[in-house]
Image (spheres, grey):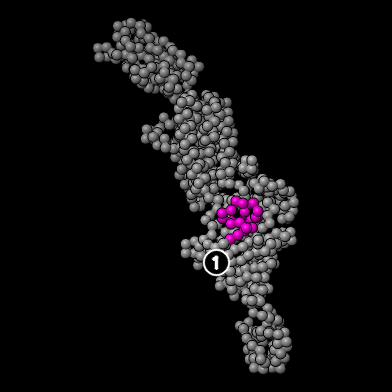
Amino acid sequence: MLPIEVTSLKKYYGDIKAVDGVSFSVNKGEVFGLLGPNGAGKTTSIEVMEGLRERTSGDVKILGLDPWKNGYELHKKIGVIPQEFTFFEKTTPREAIKYYANLFNVKVDADEILKEVLLEDMAKQNFENLSGGQKQKTGLALSLVNSPELLFLDEPTTGLDPNARRAIWEVIRGLKAKGKTIILTTHYLDEAQHLSDRVAIMDHGRIVAMGTTEEIIQKHGSGERLEIHGSEKLADYIRANTELEVEYNSKGEVIVPLRKKIDALAALAAAEQSGLEWGEIQTRQDSLDDVFVKLVTEPIGEQGNMESAERTNKKKRR
Amino acid sequence: MASAKRIYADFKVFSIGYLRNKFGLFFGLVFPVILILIFGAIFSGGGTGTVNVYAQNQDDGVFGQNIGSQFLSALNESTTIKVITVNASENFAEYLKEHSASDGIVIPQNFSAEYLAGQQVNVTVYGNPASSTSGIVGGTVNGYANYFNLQRFNGSLVIGLTSASVSTEQKTYVDYLIPGLIGFSILTSPMFSLVNISSEYKKTKLFKQLSLTPLTKMEWLTSKVIWYIVLTIAGFLLMVGVGVFGFGAHVTISAWLIPFLVLGPMLFAALGMLVGTVTKNPETAGVIGNIVTFPMMFLAGTFFPISSMPAYLQSFAHVLPLFYVTEGLNNVMVYGNINGALIDIAILGIITLVIFVLAVKLFKWRED
């Protein structure tokens, strides 16, 4: 039995297809990233899996249980940080952990958990006085109280500064090392790439690509290519004098897709032969960012952060 | 039991949070006491007002003249007494008791005849010797008797006074104010707090989060109710203390108060949650909460006894759930009317049950 098995999951709100036929499974001990702009259906999918929303159709088995019908049973076995985690303002992280321990009827070492999420210093601060990152860490701490084998982290680092994000990553890596199965949603590409064993890219309620990041890049990205800074004439010369495919882009780069490494040598020899001027050279492969831009219809902002995509998407949904 | 353990855990975390929040404590405990101090000071001050006196005229009159009525109207024109006429067929002593009054006057049957014939006839003045008003009433009636004697008989004693002692304690404004303000805090504290919490938790998705733990919504609401019962009892003791020691209020404390101190917070916590649950966002919830709360706050006998309001408002008061709390508290603490209190408990119990069940049914942890 796999920890997560989702088959043809659909969740409609009237005419709006929030999730439109999604299938995937997650292996034990794996970190699985659901990547996509906001409004792509990540949170809806994850909330269906957590038993917080009822699905329209499809089959979902989490640790062998139907999350909607057996939610109460399931919740004892999973850990969850919802998006934008909040807690009682006047409660400290340590008290929060003890509270959860009592609710789950388990004995825990609160200090141990605080240490695990790097929050020992703030154990006695009221939740309202914590920074964004510390609040998320409190959420992580609470999701660990019932020693779950499976963790759902819904955008655990959204809105955090780079240092806080890295601190959360460190915690998540620690959990992975302990063998926990983790499903993670994010709209940060680097986060998915750094943390996940496998990634599914979602757009408009569907999975548009799935696999390891390398597999996705290989399948959906272009292969390795040589880029030469030079004129359009240079591109024409190389095209005429080799058997290579040559493109020229608006940045003033001659692009030569490489079927074999040796193709680079032929292209460079032709460039040298041309007597034309040429500058910097490099070989490049599509990054996850490039693939993402190709697969997801919305424009993408800086650093893989798709705030703008999010907005256009939301408008569409309305 | 796991459920009790969860309720206790939730109770603990909520009460600690509540105690750390100065605003909550202020409105829960300090504010009602401040109200007692303010209203108590305003109304129990110099005692400059007139004294209400119940009067029964048993005089039948003679030759078309009723001296008894003349005597009472003369008294009514004094600045110290306001005469409230009681039907001649009533048992006067009983009547005083029922109305929690101690001051009264009875004009005997052949008053006019005896007076006109110059025979001595006595007016009976009822009063509680321990009360300051009985002196005022006695003095005023005596003054007018002398005036009537002087007018007709050059001062020879015709109208005399008999006094009758009444054990009914004179009720002061503070006596009514204490049950009223206890009712006020039973209403406001759980109601405002739960409207706020339930709409806020919905917005910030805290409910969703709690739904991922073994805590059930019933357990969650129960722990809130228990906390507001604790808070209500603390507020009750504080207010009674201030009323009795600060303003010399006369109130009866008995076990019959317990149902009100339990059902009241339960009702208004559930009602607050209902308002917070059925509204879309915290802003709307706040507005609806106020619409539900404010009429009750002023019209259910909190600041003024219901009997001092016009008849149509009195009938309106009967549809307000808080009315049965304040009336019940008054019945126990002020009138010693346990039968009346039992009816209030029954009505309050039914309303509470309906609202509580409705709140738990309509309140959703998770969405569909």
Who's the residue at 68% across and 51% down the image? A146
- Please name the residue that numbered disc 1 is placed on: A21
Point out residue B327 in the picture as x, y percentages from the top left corner.
Answer: 46, 31
Residue nearest the observer in this picture, A278 or A134: A134
Instruction: Count neighbours of disc 1 (C-alpha within 10 A) and say few if under 14, some if 14 to 19, many if 20 or more.
Output: some
Tell me the amino acid under the disc marked 1.
Gly
Quadrant of residue A196 within the rendered picture: bottom right
**Tag 1, which chain?**
A
Who's the residue at 69% across and 93% down the image? A274
Residue found at the very far left of the displayed protein: B63
Who's the residue at 47% across and 47% down the image? B288
Q: Which residues are magenta?
A: A60-87
Residue nearest the observer in this picture, B67 or A1: A1
| Residue A222 visible at all | yes
Q: Is disc 1 placed on a helix, strand or loop? A: strand
In this rendering, is residue B30 above or below A114?
above
Residue nearest the observer in this picture, B248 or B347: B347
The reply to whether the magenta stretch includes residue B324 is no
In the picture provided, is A132 more to the left or to the right than A205?
Answer: right
Residue nearest the observer in this picture, B237 or A238: A238
| Residue B24 visible at all | no
Who's the residue at 62% across and 54% down the image? A74
Residue found at the very far front of the displayed protein: A1
In this figure, what is the number of numbered marks?
A: 1
The reply to whether the magenta stretch includes residue A69 is yes
Point out residue A232 in the picture as x, y percentages from the top left corner.
Answer: 63, 89
Point out residue A141 in the picture as x, y percentages from the top left corner.
Answer: 69, 53
